[in-house]
Image (spheres, rainbow, N blue to C red):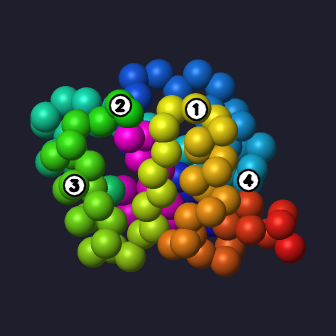
Amino acid sequence: MNSLLIVGADKLGAIPDRLSELGFSDIMHISGRKVKMVHREIPENIDLVLVLTDFINHNVSSKLKERAKEKAIPVCYAKRSWCSIYKALSTCNEVCEQCPLLEKAR
């Protein structure tokens, strides 16, 4: 698992750097605040979706969840803090066995 789509928040700060340290090489970001984001599709090469819950339009979150389920892409939810993101990624039940966090724990 190496590609990640982050949905939510206007700015990510050092989050992408920390995620790349965990093994995510392809990180995309969509702010998810605007109503028009409801019509955005999940790109084909995405392995995991991370939703930052404190900075996202509710309808965007619902549609994103539906689209991810259709494509069998796992979705993790977290607040926009590194502690919350790390915890969500390491405890997400839907994350596949190839996740860099699970490999480090073994």
Q: Is residue 44 magenta?
A: yes
Work out whether residue 29 can be spotted: yes
The residue singled out by tag 3 in the image is: 62
Question: Which quadrant holds residue 98?
Answer: bottom right
* 81 left or right of 53 in image: right
Amino acid, disc 2 = Phe
Q: Is label 3 in contact with label 4 (beta carbons under 8 Å)?
A: no
Mark 2 Cα within 10 Å, few/some/many (few <14, many 20+)? some
Amino acid, disc 1 = Ser
Question: Where is the C terminus found, in terms of image quarters?
Answer: bottom right
Q: Nearer the viewer, mark 1 or mark 4?
A: 1
First-in-chain label (2 vs 3): 2
| Magenta-drawn segment | 43-53
The residue singled out by tag 4 in the image is: 23
Mark 2: secondary structure? helix
First-in-chain label (3 vs 4): 4
Q: Is label 2 in contact with label 1 (beta carbons under 8 Å)?
A: no
Q: CA distance from mark 2 to mark 4?
A: 25 Å
The residue singled out by tag 1 in the image is: 81
First-in-chain label (2 vs 4): 4
Q: CA distance from mark 3 to mark 4?
A: 28 Å
Q: CA distance from mark 2 to mark 1?
A: 11 Å
**Residue 74 coordinates in the image, percent (x, y):** 45, 67
Tell me the residue at 42%/69% (across/down): 73
